[in-house]
Image (cartoon, grey):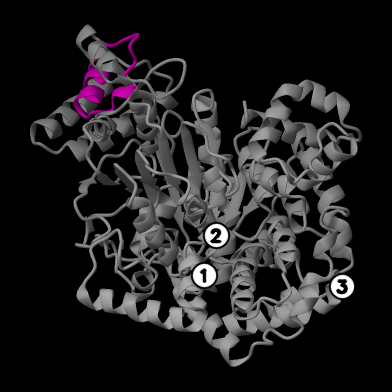
Amino acid sequence: MHSVEIFEECVKINNLIENCNKAEARSMVIKLLDKLQRDENEYTPLVNHVIREVGLFPYIDCNTALWEDQVVVEAFKANVGDTTPVTLHSAQSYVLKQLLLGENIAVSAPTSFGKSFIIDAFIAIRKPENVVILVPTVALADETRRRIEHKFSHDYKIVTTTDATIAERNIFIFPQERSFAYLDKLRTIDMLIVDEFYKASSRFDDDRSLSLLSAIIELGKISRQKYFLAPNIHEIADNVFTQGMQFVRLTDFKTVITKAAKIYNKRRKAENVDKFKEFHLINILQNSKSKTLIYAGSYNGINKISDILIKNLPLKETSLLDDFNDWLKVNYGDAFSLCQLSKRGIGVHNGKMHRSLSQIQVKLFEFVDGLDTIISTSSIIEGVNTQAEQVIVWSNKNGSHTFDYFTYRNIIGRAGRMFKYFVGKVYLLEKPPVQENTTLTIEFPNEVAESLDTENPGIEISQKQNDLIKEYEVYMSEALGAENFRQIRKLSIFKSCDPRIIKLLVEKLRSNPNWPRGYSALAATNTYNWREPILDVISLLGDNMARLIKIAIWKMPDNWTRSIAEIYSDLSGISYEDLFSAERYLSYNLCSTLSVINILRKSFNPASPDISLFIGRAANAFLPKLVYQLEEYGLPRMISRKIQDSNLINLENDSIEISDVITQFKNIGKERLIKSVKNLLPFDCFIIDYFYEGIC
């Protein structure tokens, strides 16, 4: 840009500021910075000044800024746990100030706002003893842990599992279900942080909203301060869960902007929709080498897009991708569709895939010679904080339903990244929903109320809810015995379980003490006989997983001794995604229910077989506990197997916790580990390097 053009743009921005239209002025500043970046122009003092006026202080270039603008940069620097302070923008600074004053805050801000800096600054400045950070997914827990570990592991114990011993100062990071394990171990929490708290509404997460609400209540009893975060919420309807919290809406404070191209408008009336979308998808990818996220809308959408890209895109030949492809073939097998996709610089992200494999692909997305494109369901908007230069919206569905404006905004919010992509590009292949303001309504379901203690509910309840609690307590006391129920309700597995399921199981066991059929088989090792009791439980829950579990269950115990490729070759009639789904369903959903059944059966009949050993093994996907937990740290089971075989670390020792093993990894060091472990593939070394980045 010429200096005259820059000056004219700054005049327009200044006029907007003087007319109190800072949001539009801020957008114009970001567009100007994008032009300057592309033309490789330096920021003039005037450019730095308008950056300051709209509150985007981190973007100020102190090398060319006037002294008064440089002063602002220094004034808004904060300790976020790094070696050097970081400059916050004006909105971040406001929220941090309110938290430091002790306020309880619910914040709604854009995806690229930089909410994590506020958390880190609060911890670095206030130095609280116990912080609990609830996140919606294990992937986001690991991403948060990596950031926190790097900054605060010298002063805090970072806890991500349910079996850790707590230290004097702790930062807990996990999905809400794991938080119940620490309710009896913690006396106080200095700060309770709930990320993506909109999921407390059944409208946005019907499956897990109940457990999140229960966690907010139980943790809230011992929390001194609360900080809730969400994107794109315009208003919060009155509710008891955010009562007394200050709602701060910063949805207009953008640090990047998006430009949406309405490709769907180009389709002629008689033109085939799928052919139209296929043509434009290929055209966009072939004409741009930008990092791209493709929102597929569903698992079937991922498969359809994968087939299109495999047929139409050329190979991307880099040593990094070649190594990744070789690693996939060895460990997962040639038939795994990701093998064909990765050759073309394409990855896949969904809720079914092995966690470590999803994390590895997100890491590869950061490299020029790595993945250029990731095809995803909604998991990419709630599982990780990945940003790209462009987002292609292939479908306007979220599963089988048309997505709403809130979800749409979250999807396209992945386009753009501070300092890298000032302007994110969005290509809409289907029509988006009509723009609307989102009011977050958080109901207080009876199922959550029933699980509370009338003596200490921890939240304001109505007389009707109080009566419901008493009715539930009377029912359970009569069914299990008053003292027995009093003891059982303290257990973390019961606190995290939906009361509807507990009542359903109690009713079933009272009417049929021998249910599920063949229950004792779960205390034995014959995998074939596991099917009958497991299928009985699945049938009662009404989950559509019976076919997959029936096929996969007999091979799951091989997870530690055989590769995924070998296991898959013995199965027929299911896909890799089905195998991943069966493993995840068994290790989480089913094991949670089986744990409750085991306790209830013992309550009704002390002579009932104890299946806790089966539950423990299945909950860890039939891997050693430490190996399963290390997968959440980004270390796949196949590399853990090689480490175990090299006798470097005993990963089969279930008596120690993950923090002790991480200390062993740190003491050994990356270089010595790579030299000592036999038969490492080149990409194994890449993964080990990534793993060490997250623990050091």
Q: Residue furthest front?
A: 483
Q: Position of residue 243 (x, y in %)?
A: 21, 55
Q: Are marks 2 and 3 in contact (CB under 8 Å)?
A: no
Amino acid, disc 2: Thr
Read off the magenta span.
Answer: 45-65
Query: Is 379 situated above or below 98?
Result: below
- Residue at 74% x, 46% y: name it: 654
Residue 399 marker: 1
- Residue at 70% x, 59% y: name it: 616
Q: Which residue is mark 2?
A: 377
How far apart are the alpha carbons under marks 3 and 1? 37 Å
How far apart are the alpha carbons under marks 2 and 3? 37 Å
* Depth check, front residue: 496 or 412: 496
Badge 3 or badge 1: first in the primary sequence: 1
- Residue at 54% x, 49% y: name it: 293
Secondary structure state at the residue bearing disc 2:
loop
Residue 526 marker: 3
Q: Tell me the quarter of the image containing the C terminus.
A: top right
Secondary structure state at the residue bearing disc 3:
loop
Q: Is residue 57 magenta?
A: yes
